Amino acid sequence: MDDTEKIGCCGAYCRTCREFLKTCKGCKLGYLDGSRELRRAKCGMKVCCLTKGHITCADCERFDSCEPLQGFLLHPGYKYSKCGQALAFIRANGYSAFLEMADRWKNAYGKFE
């Protein structure tokens, strides 16, 4: 699995998530190699992102105007704001910088430097 495959389309980082380390398949595992059917995925953001060939929604030209994504990011709750921070960081600094920073996190979310 490529390291960017551990970043969910929404910006969640699977590698440091306890559930991913136990049993979770994450957002992309199986969809990229065809062992899971993308058309059966329940997440519309994932279907859109992967169909367009993006790594995350940060790569999309419709990022600021995408209603499903913006609705997700504006949802109340800590994880949603952290996903938004992750996508903003990726857009500003790229995937290599994100992975370098996120690999030091101890939990599913961490501080953005």
Image (spheres, grey):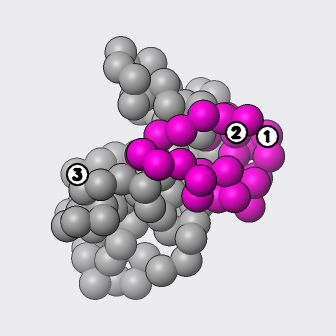
The amino acid beneath tag 2 is: Phe
Mark 2 — residue?
Answer: 89
Is residue 67 in the magenta section? no
Left-right relation of 50 to 113: left
Instruction: Indicate the quadrant where residue 78 lies.
Output: top left
C-alpha separation, residue under disc 3 versus residue under disc 1 = 29 Å
Residue 39 x %, y %: 27, 65
Decide if residue 15 is in sight here. Answer: yes
- How would you rate the neighbour count of disc 3 (Cα within 10 Å): few for under 14, some for 14-19, many for 20 or more? few
Residue 16 x %, y %: 43, 55
Residue 19 x %, y %: 25, 56
Residue nearest the viewer, comparing 89 with 19? 19
Label 2 close to label 3 by CB (< 8 Å): no
Mark 1 — residue?
Answer: 92
- How would you rate the neighbour count of disc 1 (Cα within 10 Å): few for under 14, some for 14-19, many for 20 or more? few
Looking at the image, is mark 3 or mark 1 nearer the viewer? 1
Mark 3 — residue?
Answer: 42
